[in-house]
Image (cartoon, rainbow, N blue to C red):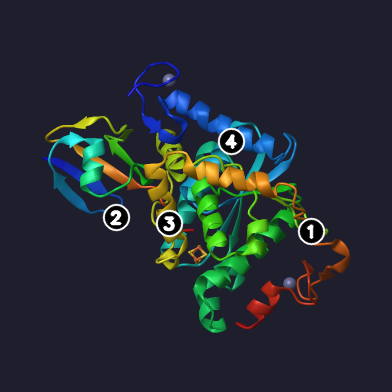
Amino acid sequence: MKCVKCKGDAVINIRRANAAFCKEHFNEYFTEQTLKAIKHFRMFRKTDKIMVCVSGGKDSLVLWHVLHKLGCDVTGMYIDLGINGYSDRSKDKVNSFAERFGLKTIIVDLREKGHPIPFVARKAKREDCAVCGTIKRYYFNKTAYDGGFDVVATGHNLDDEASRLLANIMHWDDEYMNNTYPVLPAGGKMLKKKVKPLVRLTERETAAFAILNGIDYVMEECPMSKGATSLVFKDALSTIEENMPGSEIFFYTKFLERVKDIDRSKTDSDEMKICQTCGMESFMDKCTFCRLVEKVK
Amino acid sequence: MVKVEFTDGKVEEMSPAPVKDILRKLNLKESTTLVTRDGELLTHDIYVYDGQSIKIINVVSGG
Ligand code: SF4
Ligand SMILES: [Zn+2]
Ligand SMILES: [Zn+2]
């Protein structure tokens, strides 16, 4: 197969774009698609201070890399979930990546804070992933606020977003559907804007970018993700995409066009209170996070 | 034979063939995998010869 740009040997073919690229032109395509999303959805300006949530997986490391190469002021924020083995290995990947490219990082260690995920889940008698969601969201918001960041970026890709949309449509979950958008505005006085610059790229493309550019990511999955229902929707979508290339991005972008005018600034700052325990904004006198970790003290 | 290694460490032996056919025999989709030989990405038309080894990377993550 030949590169559609230079006729050199291709390293990857992208069926939905009817294209194949050599390494150089794939990198160019990848960066263009990222920039296209950033501009189209007005994600941030050149001068904004960006916090990227990194897990050590391919998508977040690739996003960090691309934003850094674009000359953005970007800091990687990693949460050590306290999951034995997996957390240690993923943290190593984040640290060695940051060191290699001389990047700024913030590490929040849940073991140090006294609430590693498996421990909190056991004590609170709740699912690991539910607990993880609450704790991660809290620290993303808090770290972004404390650090004076303008925007929080995550590595969600086209497959993540389209499969989540499919799941939400299957459940007719209007609230989630309304929040399926690559940009969520800042809310209240403390919540920062959230953006997903990789929504025009598939997991296969982010993995290829990582491999081609020597980005060493953690290939193993979080052990708690076994049997995640999101995989069922991803599998269904990839079967459709395999037979009808281009269906997935069509499905996703047409949805975005339909919902583009919805007002997503849900937290009217007047109705927000301040958590009496931690000082972060909350709908109640004590925030969800503080109520959760209190149970395990 | 061609040595096929998977992300989880499993190894299989297969007959020489283009990447596309190898994936099809393994029941894997093009859109969820990447294939490398000596660390280099291969497009699906590339023929893998007897004695060579390839790695199949599953790109789907559960998060
Ligand atoms: S799979 Fe792991 S990282 Fe993801 S939400 Fe569950 S516990 Fe957290
Ligand atoms: Zn080229
Ligand atoms: Zn609180």
Mark 4 or mark 1, whichever is nearer to me: 4
Q: Earlier in the sequence, mark 4 or mark 1?
A: 4
Residue holding disc 3: A89
**Residue visible at 55% across and 49% down in the picture:** A156
Ligand 3's quadrant is bottom right
Circle 4 SS class: helix
Q: Residue furthest top?
A: A6
Q: Which residue is mark 2?
A: B8
The 10 Å Cα crowd at callout 1, few under 14, some 14 to 19, many 20 or more, is some
Respond whether the residues carrying marks 2 and 1 are from the same subunit: no
Label 1 sits on a secondary structure element that is loop
Instruction: Give the labeled residue for mark 1.
Output: A190
Whether marks 3 and 4 lie on the same chain: yes
SS type, badge 3 = helix
How far across and how far down the image is residue A289, in percent?
Answer: 67, 72
> In the rendered structure, which amino acid carries the disc numbered 1?
Met
**Mark 3 in CB contact with mark 4 (< 8 angstroms):** no
